[in-house]
C-alpha cells in the first residue's frame, strides 16, 4: 500500500488574515486546513455539498496545529492535505503548509471528524461508498 493521496492547494495570505506586523493570525491555520480539506474532498468527487445533500456532515471532533515558522501577509503558500485514516465512524485529515518556492514547512496538523446524520444530529456509520472512495486513495493505484 502506498501512502495516502496528497492534494495541494496554492493560496496567498490575505491582508485581513494578518496582524499589524504582517504575521498571519494563528487561528487562520484552521481555516486554511478547511480550505485544503474541502479541495481534497472535491478532488475525490465528494465535495461537502454532495455529502450534505446525501444527509451527512463531517463534524470536527479534534484539531491540532504545530507551528514552525510564521506566514506573512502576501506570502504564497501551499496546503498539502491527506487522509491517512478512515474508519466506520471517524476519519482523519493531515495537513502541511509550505511556503511556495522555498518549500519551507510553516505548520502541520490534523483534524479528526465524526460522521453525523444531518437530520438527527447523531453520529452514524459512514456510508460504504464514502469508505470506498476515501480509503481507496490509500491503496497503490498502479
Image (tube, rainbow, N blue to C red):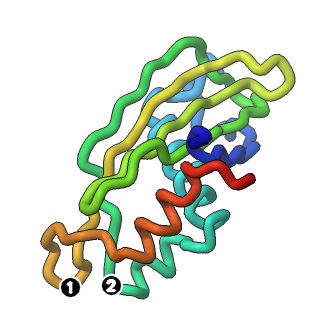
Task: Name the residue: 55% across, 49% down.
Answer: 138
User: Disc 2 versus disc 1: distance between alpha carbons?
Assistant: 7 Å
Q: Along the horizontal axis of the image, is 10 left or right of 130? A: right
Q: Residue furthest top?
A: 68
Give the image location of residue 122, x and y in percent: 13, 71
Task: Name the residue: 60% across, 17% down.
Answer: 70
Give the image location of residue 142, x and y in percent: 74, 53
Residue 31 visible in the shown view: no
Read off the residue under disc 2: 55
Splitting the image into 4 quarters, where does residue 87 fall?
bottom left
Splitting the image into 4 quarters, where does residue 58 fall?
bottom left
Which of the two discs, 2 and 1, labels the residue nearer the N terminus?
2
| SS label for mark 1 | loop
Task: Name the residue: 40% across, 79% down.
Answer: 52
Q: Look at the numbered discs 2 and 1 and tell me whether their residues touch, using CB distance below 8 Å.
A: yes
Residue 43 visible in the shown view: yes
Read off the residue under disc 1: 119
132 and 22: which is toward the camera: 132
Q: Quadrant of the N terminus?
A: top right
* Above or below 89: residue 8: above
Amino acid at each position: 500500500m502506498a501512502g495516502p493521496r496528497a492534494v495541494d492547494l496554492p493560496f496567498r495570505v490575505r491582508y485581513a488574515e494578518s496582524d499589524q506586523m504582517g504575521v498571519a493570525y494563528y487561528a487562520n491555520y484552521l481555516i486554511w486546513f478547511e480550505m485544503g480539506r474541502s479541495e481534497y474532498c472535491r478532488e475525490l468527487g465528494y465535495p461537502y455539498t454532495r455529502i450534505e445533500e446525501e444527509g451527512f456532515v463531517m463534524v470536527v471532533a479534534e484539531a491540532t496545529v504545530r507551528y514552525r515558522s510564521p506566514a506573512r501577509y502576501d506570502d504564497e503558500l501551499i496546503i498539502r492535505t491527506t487522509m491517512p485514516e478512515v474508519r466506520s465512524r471517524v476519519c482523519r485529515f493531515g495537513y502541511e503548509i509550505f511556503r511556495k518556492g522555498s518549500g519551507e514547512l510553516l505548520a502541520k496538523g490534523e483534524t479528526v471528524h465524526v460522521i453525523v446524520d444531518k437530520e438527527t444530529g447523531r453520529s452514524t456509520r459512514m456510508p460504504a461508498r464514502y469508505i470506498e472512495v476515501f480509503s481507496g486513495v490509500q491503496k497503490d493505484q498502479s
